Image (spheres, rainbow, N blue to C red):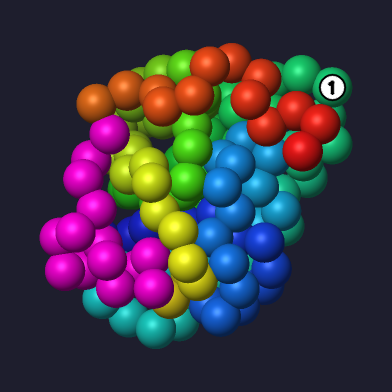
Amino acid sequence: MKIAVTSTGETLTCQVDPRFGRAAYFLVGDSEGNEFETIKNENIAVAGGAGISSAKLVADAGAQAVLTGNCGPNAERTLRAANVKLYTGATGTVAEAIELFRSGKLQEAEGPNVPPHSGVGE
């Protein structure tokens, strides 16, 4: 399964970015492999619509699932519409979050876990 993980940096050793829409980077790759493409998130500084634009970005990259700390309602709806599964509550390094996903220890989110605009100003 192709997954996207929010990240504070460009490698698997970086911390999971707790924000989805305004994450610094997305690391995208096969959940069973160790090679991930780094996508810089240009939506980090937009005035509005970061969650929706970021959801489109990862869906266009072919992600079938997203691992992140938090996700608001607009992004969650956009991901759901694109048939991308959402896993919130990811912490630690990107590599650790991927391992939690592989071992089934991350639960698929039933909806957003933060209100709109939660990542603004952080």
Which image quarter: residue 2? Answer: bottom left
Q: Quadrant of the N terminus?
A: bottom left
Tell me which amino acid carries mark 1: Ala
Tag 1: Cα neighbours inside 10 Å, few (<14), some, or many (≥20)?
few
User: Quick check: 17 left or right of 62?
Assistant: right
Estimate the x, y position of residue 11 in percent, counting from the top left: 61, 78
Residue at figure coordinates x 56%, y 80% from the top left = 13
Say if 73 sits above or below 101 in the image: above
Which image quarter: residue 29? Answer: bottom left
Residue at figure coordinates x 41%, y 19% from the top left = 77
Say if 119 sits above or below 105 in the image: above
* Residue at the disc numbered 1: 47
User: Quick check: 106 left or right of 73?
Assistant: left
Estimate the x, y position of residue 82 in percent, counting from the top left: 37, 29
Residue 30 in view of the camera: no
Q: In which quarter of the image is the C terminus?
A: top right
Residue 7 in view of the camera: yes
Residue at figure coordinates x 47%, y 67% from the top left = 92
SS label for mark 1: loop
Estimate the x, y position of residue 66 in percent, counting from the top left: 40, 48
Range of residues picked out in magenta? 96-109
